[in-house]
Amino acid sequence: MSPRRSAAHAQQTRHLIVTAGVDLASVEGLDAITLGRLAEELTMSKSGVIGHFGSKLDLQLAVLNEAVRVYRREVIVPAAHAAPGLARLRKLVEAWISHLERGVYPGGCFFTQVTTEYDDRPGPVRDVARQRTEEWRAYLAEQISTAVQDGDFSADTDVDQVIFEATGLMLSLNHTMQLDLDPKAIQHARAGFERLIAACMR
Amino acid sequence: MSPRRSAAHAQQTRHLIVTAGVDLASVEGLDAITLGRLAEELTMSKSGVIGHFGSKLDLQLAVLNEAVRVYRREVIVPAAHAAPGLARLRKLVEAWISHLERGVYPGGCFFTQVTTEYDDRPGPVRDVARQRTEEWRAYLAEQISTAVQDGDFSADTDVDQVIFEATGLMLSLNHTMQLDLDPKAIQHARAGFERLIAACMR
DNA sequence: CCTACCGATCGGTAGG
DNA sequence: CCTACCGATCGGTAGG
């Protein structure tokens, strides 16, 4: 039980808490995270949970940051080997659809859940969620702009329009899957992206 | 203070509670509705609030039903005078965009908020929200099918694909407005619908 | 990491 | 519609 091992163990415990928080928040929202529920799930005390963070807000922010880390690993990284521009855009779309299909977050798209929950609640959670969303949009914009520069997309492509519609296809897929509204949702999403990309190419 | 007047007054109070609940739920979700908050806002006692409903669940369902009534008044009715088919579809889209612009619900699209909140929580709230969503989709499907029968839309129009993409445009508009991501969101939504409808016409 | 505890708030009830 | 109350749970702290 050297100090080094204790510190490592503490960090491991912290990671267990944060990971459980991501799963819980993706299903019921960041507000549904309570010290008591996490403590019970991890068979530890409430003070053992909160001790790693200081306050519930800091716990919520740690959960949000962990969700971002998962998103990078599951959506950004798998597409990173593709060349910037149209190729990477296609890979990002596929990785995004795949992360929903694979149930990376048990409650569907984590950021839809949290941004919908906090879009009208000013504070650090809203600020961070909004900032991460902007970064994702900027990353998509980069790929689209590069596709225009490469001549893959038409020179008069409206980048913001493409982002708006692509976001809609992602939101609709999550919404339709979460509510079990249409078993063909995945096909509709793919068809929508194909049409959107095809429209940019001519 | 005849019984008749008392009953009318009670109904009026009940309506005040439910209306306050719709506003609160559109912003913070149906779960954020608490007897204490509504009681304080309406300067009455908690028991005075719950007395009209019996349980919090019944209050939540009453709030959800009132939100549906508002939706009918603000989106369905304004488009009902248009002929079924393409004309009514256009009016529904305009009325939907308009209800967001006018801030009919202070927290944006009420049903996005509640379906996102409850899509993973089995129970009456999820069931009712899902059922109302299905009804809305069926109503859209009617207009699209009629447009096909009228010859306004191509015979090979995929009705479910159109609903999927139209839902995406609505979700994206709400999302983008709620997070102040792009001041041109309304234009993007209109352009998206124009493109979607144009694609069905040829 | 724990136990033991704090004040606040939750949904709901009793009795009027 | 009210006051007065119930047990449960909330976030958080003290002290170890």
Image (spheres, coloured by chain):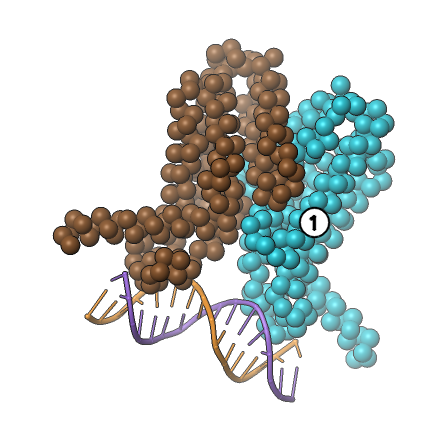
Chain colours: A brown, B cyan, C purple, D orange
Mark 1 = which residue?
B131
Q: Image quadrant for the C terminus of chain B?
A: top right
With A81 as the anchor, is A198 left or right in this view? right
Q: Residue at x 44, y 55 (%)?
A: A33
Q: Vertically, is A180 above or below B196?
A: below
Is residue D8 rendered to the left or right of residue B126?
A: left
Q: Nearer the viewer, residue A119 or B68?
A: B68
Where's residue A67, x and y in %?
Answer: 41, 42
Query: Picture quarter containing residue B95?
Result: top right
How far across and how far down the image is residue B174, in percent?
60, 40
Say if B82 sits above or below B49 in the image.
Answer: above
Say left or right for A8 vs C8: left
Q: Chain of mark 1?
A: B
Whether B24 is drawn above or below A156: the answer is: below
| Above/below status of B48 relative to A165 | below
Q: Identify which residue, B61 or D11, lies in the foreground.
A: B61
Which residue is more in the foreground, B163 or B77? B163
Query: Whole-percent x and y of residue B172?
Result: 59, 36
Residue A176 or residue B116, whichever sits in front: A176
Graded by Cα atoms within 10 Å as few (under 14), some (14 to 19) or many (20 or more), the crowding at tag 1 reads some
Element type where label 1 sits in the image: helix
Q: Is residue A43 visible?
A: yes
**Quarter of the figure with residue A193:** top right
Q: Residue sitting at 70 percent across and 56 percent down?
A: B65
- Residue at the left extreme of this rendering: A2
Could you say where residue A34 lies in the image, as x and y percent from the top left?
42, 59
- Residue displayed at 80% across by 78% down: B3
Looking at the image, which residue sits at the far top? A151
Residue drawn where x is 74% and y is 45% of the image: B135
Tell me the quarter of the image containing the N terminus of chain B: bottom right
Callout 1, which amino acid?
Answer: Gln
